[in-house]
Amino acid sequence: MALSRRKLLLGGAAVAVAIPVGSQAWWSSKNFVRDGFDPDLPKAPTGERAWVNWSGIEKATPKILAAPTSTEEVVALVQNSPTPIRPAGSGHSFTALCPSEGTMVDIGALSGIISHDPVTNIATLGAGTKLQQAARLLHEQGLALANLPDIDVQTLAGGFSTATHGTGRNLTAIHDYVRGFELVTPSGDIVQASAEQNADLFQAGKVSLGALGIITRYDLQVEPAFDLHRRVKLVKTEDILDQYMGLSEQHRNFEAVFFPNTGHGATFTHDKYEGSLSGEQPSEDDNFLQDLKQLRDTFGWSSWLRRKIFAASVDPEAGEDTTDAGWKLLATSRPSKFNEMEYHIPLENGLETLRTVIAKMESRNDAFYPIEARVTAPDDAWLSPFNDGHRLSIAIHADSSENFQYFFTEFEPIFRAAGGRPHWGKLHSLGAKELSALYPKFAAFNQLRRELDPTGKLVNPYLSKIWGEA
């Protein structure tokens, strides 16, 4: 949530209550840092390099951490490097998709716009281009992707391959903009895939988990650049829930976040805009998040007190109203690191599940990170979580230094009971048996994967579980 000023004034002075000294002292002495927390790089053997993902929970010391500068160099890598071979992306996945003690491939040098066809409005970009970089470069040419996720540091290959999404009832996940790609197979062949050429590979490869080969470039459907009007409002939790479906239908982009044990959340809307631009306001999301954390740290022992202090201390008119280029407003920076689980729930089960998740999170006095809810339109990629209809994506978070194991014991059963599919790049415990029941094309994808990678060059221990080869 972007606020113009820090509004949450902590310390309890804004509300007159009798604070039980014993409870306050007991809670204030708590240490929320989880056992084993270590965000630093692992120690690599002599001559090798270390790798850690963004949140610090996945680490590796690969024998080779390669940074190819051409498709031909990628070919040489997959033919000659120690296995398993895994694309590194930008390291923003929370699952263990990327780690390898063999070879990790950073395709960041394969970036930028290669070409643009003004007739079809298809742009070809290097697969290592970061989403933010792609959006900026396209904007400089008067172009844009139809939508962006709220985090844009991922590579195109990483974002597409994990079904990364933004929000919008009539907007699909970003892999649906792919019209073709170039893939280096595990045997070193260079293959082109599109709806007209290698159609099965195309449908499988749009969301591939990096399991079919190393993608080196994409052909993407783009559109003329556009401006957006962004509004952020502080709203009571129950009011957001009551209005959620209506707001998702009224606005081009709509999402909501809920602040545990405050009785409040925020709505974010973006709509197409024409006119003079006010310019992007500096986001103070991280300031607000730290205020929520301090509220938890100080008064977490009493949900009632947290609600009272929040209501008395925050400005009910706090929010944001700004206009700017669309790509500048759809994504926000995330200085504070966290771990995340997100499940995509069939829309008909979405609100009931969201209410259950909020109630469960508010039963935990240690919770302070917002719960996020977004809607995404369907597409047809084989492993897309959205390939059977609209889904409401519900994301829960924990500070990177704090416990997140309760995601699996307390929340994943709720998500699964509602027919949820996990985000491929975020925490979940599912394996081949559960995933094959969720995805009608899972077996077909796995068969195609085995044909392309019969010796398992691209299979690390995590993917062994996903493909049922453990």
Image (cartoon, helix red, strand yellow):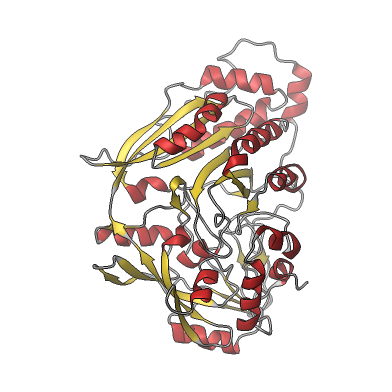
Q: Where is residue 349, by image quadrant? A: top right
Q: Position of residue 30 (x, y in %)?
A: 75, 34
In the image, residue 84 sits, relative to residue 121, either above or below, namely below
Is residue 333 rendered to the left or right of residue 60?
left
Tell me the quarter of the picture where residue 276 sits.
top left
What residue is rendered at 52% in x and 29% in y? 240
Residue 318 visible here: yes
In this rendered view, identify the residue nearer to me: 205 or 164.
205
Q: Is residue 368 above or below residue 183?
A: above
Q: Position of residue 342 (x, y in %)?
A: 62, 49
Q: Residue at x 58, y 83 (%)?
A: 186
87 relative position to 25: left or right: left
Q: Nearer the viewer, residue 47 or 222?
A: 222
Instruction: Give x and y (percent) for residue 151.
Output: 48, 51
Residue that appears at 59% across and 19% down: 309
Residue 111 figure quarter:
bottom left
Give the number of callouts: 0
